[in-house]
Amino acid sequence: MKISLNWLNDYLTEEINYKNLVEKFNLMSQEVEGLYPLVDASKLIIGYVEKCENHENADKLKVCQVNVGDKTLQIICGAPNVDKGQKVIVALPGAVLPGNFKIKKAKIRDVISNGMICSLAELGVADFEKKETGIYVLDDNAEVGKDPLKYMGLDDQVLELDLTANRPDLLSMRGIAYDVKAMLDVEIKFNKPQVKRVKPEHEINIFTQTKDASVYYGQLIKDIKIKPSPYWLRSRLLASGIRPVNNVVDITNYVMLEYSQPLHAFDFKKLNSKKIIVRKANKNETIITLDEVKRKLLETDIVITDGEKPIAIAGVMGGFETEVDENTDSILLESAIFDPISVRKTSKRLALKSESSSRFEKGINHELTKEALDRACELLVEFADAKNCGGPSFFNNARKTNQQFELSFSKLKEVTGYDFEKNVVKEILDRLDFEYKLKDDIFVVNVPARRLGFESYQDIVEEIVRINGYDKIDLTLPITPTQGKLTKKQQFKRYLRTFFTGLGFYETNTYSLTDKTNATKYDLEKLSLVKIMNPITTDREYLRHSLIPALTDVLVYNKSRKINDILLFEIGRRYTFEEEVELISGLLHGRYNYSLWQKEYNNVDFYLAKGVIESLLRDLKLLDYDFRAPKQKLPNMHPGIVSEIFIGEEKIGWLGKIHPEVEKQLEVKDTYVFELELDKIFTPYQKINVNYQDIVKYPSVNRDIALVVDKDILAQDLIKTVKEISNNSLKTVDIFDVYQGDKLEENKKSIALSLIFENKEKTLETEEIDTMVNRIVNALTEKHKAKLRR
């Protein structure tokens, strides 16, 4: 919200310090984004062009003699519209224009120039005049030798606020004035519009056929002369961020800024009807809006009609057929209130966001709808030579807003921790212009309609505290039932982060929202899809089922910036209507453990990814893990390089290589991913008791055996059998070699196992070791038809 401080001063009975105003806003109300001059220029003066002759040495330059009040200056000007008899804006030598453009005395084609005649663009306010073609020519009332910025109302300061959603009252200058009154404890004044009306020649009838239009006033105004608005009005619109157009449009915008009540003007002759009906749009109904786009309406849209066809989309945009133009001489001026939700939905669907629609969406004060119309009528009489034909036609079904709340002193102290005095609270409520009664230490407060959105006594407390000063509330630590330590689940997540970062992974934190394709891209089964009702974009319309698509997006982002070795992990959630499931997902691509000096590294592959998961599970003492070939195809994964992960008989996740077709779309190669359900790891992890053991005094014994088995036999099945048949003396069993080649039959392979035996009580004898090894070999032969390779 941009605020003209010249405009604000009209409401105040005393001058205010702008620096103090900024501090108060930051401490008590809204954050100030900036305070700056509307025109950042110095040493400007109004001049009169007494002579204008061609430059002897340049065809397109003019030599002008310009009277600036106390002297006449010779100025060279190249504008095509400069001429004798004009009153112009002169930048004197030493002037500084926007962009730090400094004006100096100069010689141009051998002729001295003592300054510059300015255009509006050179002052940074090109929008001030709709049809400027060169230098700006002031009107005849401009006084030579005076400050042109002051004369035009451009000597203004702009205060820019970053408004929060709970303060729609600050979308109007009157609302700003009320807030300044409360913060600075100053008096404000508002003048009641004085409207002159003549006997109407036409009667306008206005009806509603929908409850979504609660208030509608329509005023017939005739004999309008379309012309530029006065300087002061244009300047205030510019300071507020709105481009001036003509007096009628500018007045409707001005009143909107003043009252936060949007207005709309219909060309009455183009309307060609004495009836206005507000209703919902019919099925397949269309309208051409002011931007000359034909738009299809829905039955939920509110429209203004001439009794038959739509002439405006209520609260959003007017119709092209009834647009006010240079030939307009009579209008029907609308001041109305429409349902905020309906306006928001229509505005969003049609992508027609405007100053008016945003105000309708946040709510309008029904007490000022008629007064805003009267204010516009007053200005149109003064600046458009208009005649108001009788009183407005209207319907008003607005319900009085009941915003009465009770607040006791004990509750105020309990909530704030501050001991307020009665007189202080009374003074604050008076400054806020909140009516109240005090009964037995209880304030009964009536919040005015201009402050929409109050829901409970807590909103009153907030107002009292902010005006009294947040800095007066003592800093205290909240009293909570927590013990000030991490929960076991939080500790577990912290461990996971430490584990993966220790292996060289980088943690990501990506959006939970995505598009429909990515939301279900890696679903192993059909899951319910959660769609957002009001998405920011179609790319963020659904809640995800997997973190993998987001990780691949991060991969592509980094690859495009020449980062080729990428290890990523993320702890996030899968969302369905039934549940939210915490996941830990990862992605590996490129080289792992690359040494720049030694030039050593491992290319990322399936076994590296599998080793990361095995290391994690072993570190967690979850040794009953298993990697199994999936029973069904995993979507968008390589069918031959993928595995499901189990702890016991419970599936906890999966890992594998992304499908080559998907890699081709992403323009990457050899990318491996994994995804584990966090709770399915955390639950068994909680049950594990960590026991500390003495270091074994006796030496361990290592035996290696090579077994020939069928090609389809899984190595993990051999290991499982070895562990089942062995006694406590077998410490570890690992695979150290797998061989398939000419020396073996076609459907056979050789798997070499390393067995380490150890006894805590004694040194193992050779015979004991041989007995255990034979038992293992016999078990493998019986169960898997394995043969000892010699």
Image (cartoon, rainbow, N blue to C red):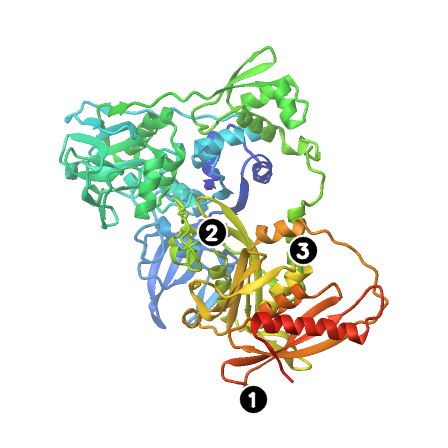
Mark 1 and 3 residues: CB-CB less than 8 Å, in contact? no
Q: Tag 2: residue type?
A: Leu
Q: Would you place residue 769 above or below residue 52 in this image?
A: below
Q: Would you place residue 185 above or below residue 326 in this image?
A: above
Which marked residue is nearer to the observer: mark 1 or mark 3? 1
Which marked residue is nearer to the observer: mark 2 or mark 3? 3
Q: Tag 3: residue type?
A: Tyr
* Location of residue 715 by image quarter: bottom right
Name the outermost residue toward the bottom. 742
Q: Determine which residue is flagged by label 1.
A: 743
Name the outermost residue toward the top. 440
Q: Determine which residue is flagged by label 3.
A: 495
Q: Determine which residue is flagged by label 2.
A: 44
Taking the spot 36% from the left edge, 26% from the top edge, the residue there is 366
**Residue 657 coordinates in the image, percent (x, y):** 49, 69
- Can residue 696 be seen? yes
Q: Tag 1: residue type?
A: Lys
Closest to the observer, 785 or 458 = 785
Question: Dot 1: what SS?
Answer: loop
